[in-house]
Image: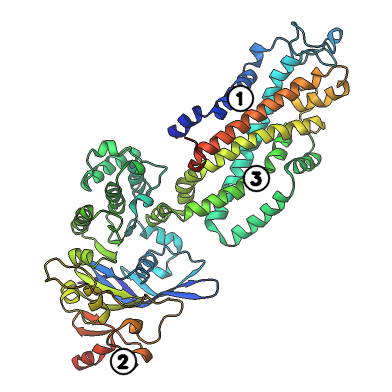
Amino acid sequence: MNEVVRLLLRHRGAQIGLCILLTIISMALLADVLAPYDPYKANLRDALKPPSLDHPMGTDEIGRDILSRIMYGARFSLFIAFASVAMGAIIGVSIGLLSGYYGGWIDYVVQRMTDILLALPGVVLALALVAVLGPGLTNLIVAVGIGFIPVYIRIVRGVTLQVKAMEYVTAAEMLGLSSLRVLFKHILPNVFPSVMVQVTLHLGSAVLAAAGLGFLGLGVQPPNPEWGAMIGTGRNYIFRAPHLIIFPGLSLFLVVLGFNLLGAALREVLDPRLRRG
Amino acid sequence: MNSLLKVNDLKVHYLLANSVVRAVDGVTFDLKENEIFSLVGESGSGKSTLAYAIARLLDSSYVRIYGEIIFNGINLLELSEIEMEKIRGNLISMIPQDSSAALNPAYTVGEQIAEVLRYKKGLSHKEARDLSIELMKKVGIPDAEKRYLDYPHQLSGGMNQRVVIAIAMALKPRLIIADEPTSALDVTVQARILELLTGLVKEYGSTMLLITHDLGVAAEVSDRIGVMYAGKLMEIGSKEEILEKPLHPYTQALLHAVPRFHKKKRRLKPIAGMVPNLSSPPSGCRFHPRCPYRSKGCILQEPLMVEVEPGHWVSCNLHAMEASYHA
């Protein structure tokens, strides 16, 4: 594990990705201290002001400071991303492990259901779910997370099949360890690296999916400063005040870029075949 | 002496897409308490399959097992998976072929020894740790306290094999199945590992079933030897009987194929032909296509296992007559 961290810290892509992500995460955590204004406080006299020294990213249609809103908005984006990926990964990994390890009809049923879920694009699935469940933070997390489950099932099932054939798994069974113990203590840790890569990449897509739903008005509701929702309301002023959508858009871009750089780097580091000297 | 394990007409069939491989086809033998019994055979003779069948570790989705495996008076084939879990590790344990592959790369070797002690014996973290270090010393791992924290990839093959032995012996099982325990090791290390293994088996009063393709290894440690060919036992006898007075043509051929230092120079004789495909084994005696003494009868009729001398069994038409005299 230390080896992986060491290689990661020397990887250019990972360095850039980590820098971006650490900046945005600290921005989110320290928003209370760092934000120059109250993100909810309207000030109609200062509405739609372009960036200036007072308001580095300008103000929105009712005069709220966009920089402050972006800082607080990072909390929504990151929280939704981590929560939905955690949900998708925990459920998907458990099902994938069981499916790969026990095989037989369990595997068959699980894989056919996975086929169905995989046939639906994630955002469309999330859209449909939010339409059914109604908007709200928890529903949003569930809607985005469900789309990730089949991906983890597939990945983990495949790796489990490989790991199951390893001699140390037979050796563990030979010691009379229960099958659940073998599964979670001996197989899971060896499945973990492949899951980590996917988690990082999914964090980026989760941020995007949540923003997409926010943009459509199905995610986090205004006046909460969620980036997608900010772009959604800002699009009415796209010609008069483009900074309303440029800055939230840029933030989204950076977060997704950060996660993708980190994910790609992680994959290279964990897969020795992709490692460059 | 009492029998610890009795295998009765055991058949193990692998169900493939359009054929059935009879990897073990009607094997009968028994293990007496405290003895070391070697099963010798070429690769593909079904000896490893037999070992895994005894431990019930074959995937039941494509493997069918028939016959009886009586361990300690219980037929293992009738036990549920949960009951079998209690027997594995506690009463029967196995030393796998490639020790470096048999250890989980995600844990230190110490943790892997301690896991068995904690999980199967209910020891606390600290007790398990102390006992593991003691076991590591016992199997001859120097600096056991330090090595406890090493991962398998940091140790040599010989050291990993010692760790695997420590794990297998941790619960002092009655039966140890050692599947080619030294085949992945250097010849120099082999002898020491064998010595360690047999020493522990004797000390704990265990019984060992040693699976090997190496007659030299079998000659060194076993009390009795069984010779397997193409899924069947060809000959069973004491070590001396098998090595000095082999009756079956296959055993004889096998002995001729092994180099010996103390005998006068002679050419090694390879056994002509190949191990048969077990999805369509030869008729009659399995060995007949390669046997220098075959007759028509061997092609038509499968020989029975007969006791030629007390304790010396052979399955060959050449000796079927002799045995009936005996009786």
Instruction: Decide which of tag 3 and tag 1 comes sooner along the chain.
Output: 1
**1 vs 2, front mark:** 2
- Residue in view at x 82 percent, y 27 percent: A232
Q: Which residue is mark 3?
A: A149
- Residue in view at x 66 percent, y 14 percent: A32
Determine the chain carrying the residue at label 3: A
> Within 10 angstroms of label 3, few (less than 14), some, or many (20 or more) residues?
many
Which numbered circle lies on residue B295?
A: 2
The image position of residue B278, as x and y in percent, is 43, 76
Is A121 left, or right, of A47 in this rendering? left
Are discs 3 and 1 both within one chain?
yes
**3 vs 2, front mark:** 2
Determine the chain carrying the residue at label 1: A
In-front residue for pair B260/B4: B260
Task: Quadrant for the N terminus of chain B, please.
Answer: bottom left
Which numbered circle lies on residue A21?
A: 1
User: What colouring style does the render use?
Assistant: rainbow
Label 3, secondary structure: give it. helix
The image position of residue B229, as x and y in percent, is 33, 76
Which of the 4 image quarters holds residue A48?
A: top right
Q: What amino acid is found at the position of numbered circle 1 in the picture?
A: Leu
> Within 10 angstroms of label 2, few (less than 14), some, or many (20 or more) residues?
few
Q: Is residue B34 visible?
A: no
Q: Is residue B250 visible?
A: yes
Q: What amino acid is found at the position of numbered circle 3 in the picture?
A: Ile
